[in-house]
Image (cartoon, grey):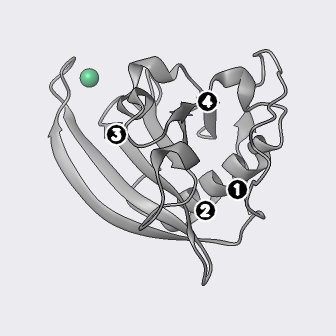
Amino acid sequence: MSSFGWQADGGISTIHWIKNVEAIGPYEVETTDESGGKCDCCGNDSSCVWGMVHKVDGPTVAAYWMHLTVGHLNDPGANLDLVVGPWGEGTTANERYSIALLYRQQVDGAPSLMVVDYADRPIGDGTLAATAVARGDVIGTPLAPQVVSIIDAIYEQDGSFF
Ligand SMILES: [Zn+2]
């Protein structure tokens, strides 16, 4: 299984509120839908694909939205918005947290992913997830392996991008 190279140049801080991090994988990805449009900056075709990540034969652990624009994969990249936590009946935004990521294809074709400022992303508004996770709250914490594992599952199983 592949793993993304984390560009860990941000600060490392400890998080205490993620005590119930789900056991890692294996995960099953269910693509939900997609929409198309034009990029505001260049007019190229853009698309948004979204889906859910479940534990195999188990509960949902995350939802994601990937925003892609033709010609943007190297720069500025593609936004992958993740909302991690339980979904469905009886769950609330208080149990979920959002992480805004930027996917980039590097010159050698290798994918890279970095945590970016959630304030610019729709998932950062508190509707779906009460807590938005900043860069330093992911890298170097127990959350990182789970996030990487979820991303790996999306990468491996959602054929509509990358
Ligand atoms: Zn554009």
Relative to 16, 134 lies left or right: left
Q: Secondary structure under badge 3?
A: strand
Residue toward you, 3 or 82: 82
- Counting residues from the start of the chain, the first of labels 4 and 1 encountered is 4
- Counting residues from the start of the chain, the first of labels 1 and 3 encountered is 3
Q: Nearer the viewer, mark 4 or mark 2?
A: 4
Is mark 1 in CB contact (under 8 Å) with mark 2? yes
The answer as to whether callout 3 falls within 8 Å of ligand 1 is no
Residue depicted at x 70% and y 72%: 26
- Counting residues from the start of the chain, the first of labels 4 and 2 encountered is 4
The residue tagged 4 is 133
Q: Secondary structure under badge 2?
A: helix
State the residue lying farthest toward the front. 90
Q: Nearer the viewer, mark 4 or mark 3?
A: 4
Q: State the image coordinates of residue 28 (x, y, percent, origin top left).
A: 56, 73
Q: State the image coordinates of residue 113 (x, y, percent, origin top left).
A: 61, 35
Residue depicted at x 35% and y 39%: 67
The relative height of residue 56 versus residue 104 in the rendered view (above or below) is: below
- Counting residues from the start of the chain, the first of labels 4 and 3 encountered is 3
Tell me the number on the disc at residue 68. 3
* Three-letter amino acid code at the position of disc 3: Leu
Q: CA distance from mark 4 to mark 1?
A: 17 Å
Tell me the number on the disc at residue 162. none
The residue tagged 1 is 149
Q: Secondary structure under badge 1?
A: helix
Is mark 3 in CB contact (under 8 Å) with mark 2? no
State the residue lying farthest toward the bottom. 57
The residue tagged 2 is 153
Q: CA distance from mark 4 to mark 2?
A: 20 Å
The relative height of residue 65 versus residue 51 in the rendered view (above or below) is: above
